[in-house]
Amino acid sequence: MRTTGMGRAAIAVAVAGAAVLAGCTVQAPDGGGKSRSPVHIELPGDTPAPARTTDDDGGGPSTAPAPPGDDKPSAAPVPPRVLWSRGDTGRDVRELQARLRQVAWLFDGPTGTYDESTERAVSGFQGKRGLPRTGKTDSVTWQRLLRMTREPGTWDLYLMGGQPADPPDPRCRTGRVMCIDKTSRTLRWMIDGRTVSTMAVRFGSRGTPTREGVFTVYWKSRDHVSTLYDSPMPYAMFFSGGQAVHYSPDFAARGYAGASHGCVNVRDEGAIAMLYGQVRDGDKVVVSW
């Protein structure tokens, strides 16, 4: 079928009109010179894609930033949780003190009481590592200390005494007894099964062990001095040969870092002075493991 020039012009006008009605646009070639379809049809109901930009670090595309005025101020950083501070007591404080001793920030104790010296030690530890010097043990300080130290043992925690006593030996449940336990390193003064007082004690070394068994107090000597070692043994209560329960200034100063020559050392002078006043010759002594 042949068309005249007038016919071709009419057809062109019709096509152009249809394109307008259909919402078509003419696309130019892309930047690479590749040709695209000259017509892009937008169907009713289509939603334009959001504007895209690049990330701040030059990475992949991201959505366009929010308009000015929509930004919210960032929240202030939350301070680490405080675990222990001055005045706190307990086993956890003992562990803190034992670990501070390992890194040479604390030399006393452990006592189980978060006192002034513990606060100073924590503050020094924090300052050395660029942490806020609060003197309070927060979660960040504690985790840093854990990474630098080992798990303390029983006698690291109770270097100066204060450990709980084990249940008394059955042989201690009748009469007047100094009930001495090598496992818990404690002495119970008991009368007819009732515990009157409890104190920390120290024993002999491997070369000079404290004998075990059931004995009786056969001699008391308030201001005794050892003739064998030329050392003071105040409040001595002898129960087996030259072995006695007595006060030890060395135990008071060094704790379980030292040992006796076989005697049962007490570090609390006030406690043993009271015990010495109550114990009589002939009272029973039980030393058990």
Image: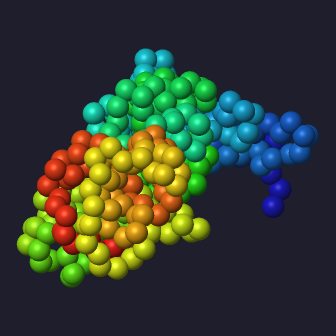
Q: Residue at x 19, y 64 (%)?
A: 281
- Work out which residue is located at the far top of the displayed protein and give it: 69
Q: Nearer the viewer, residue 34 or 217?
A: 217
- Work out which residue is located at the far bottom of the displayed protein and give it: 170
In the rendered image, the quadrant that contains the N terminus is bottom right
- Work out which residue is located at the far front of the displayed protein and give it: 227
Tell me the quarter of the picture where residue 265 sits: bottom left
Q: Residue at x 81, y 47 (%)?
A: 36
Q: Using residue 261 as the reference point, say whether residue 177 is left or right of it.
A: left
Tell me the quarter of the picture where residue 130 sits: top right
Q: Position of residue 147 (x, y in %)?
A: 59, 48
Q: Position of residue 48 (x, y in %)?
A: 55, 41
Q: Using residue 7 as the reference point, say whether residue 207 is left or right of it.
A: left
Q: Position of residue 55 (x, y in %)?
A: 67, 34
Q: Nearer the viewer, residue 138 or 154?
A: 154
Q: Nearer the viewer, residue 44 or 278?
A: 278
Tell me the quarter of the picture where residue 54 sits: top right
In the rendered image, the quadrant that contains the C terminus is bottom left
Q: Using residue 191 as the reference point, say whether residue 257 is left or right of it.
A: right
In this orientation, does residue 15 appear?
no
Q: Residue at x 11, y 74 (%)?
A: 175
Q: How many marks?
A: 0
Q: Is residue 248 above or below residue 65?
A: below
Q: Is residue 198 above or below residue 250?
A: below
Q: Position of residue 176 (x, y in %)?
A: 14, 69
Q: Is residue 206 above or below residue 256?
A: below
In this orientation, does residue 195 appear?
yes
Q: Residue at x 25, y 78 (%)?
A: 169
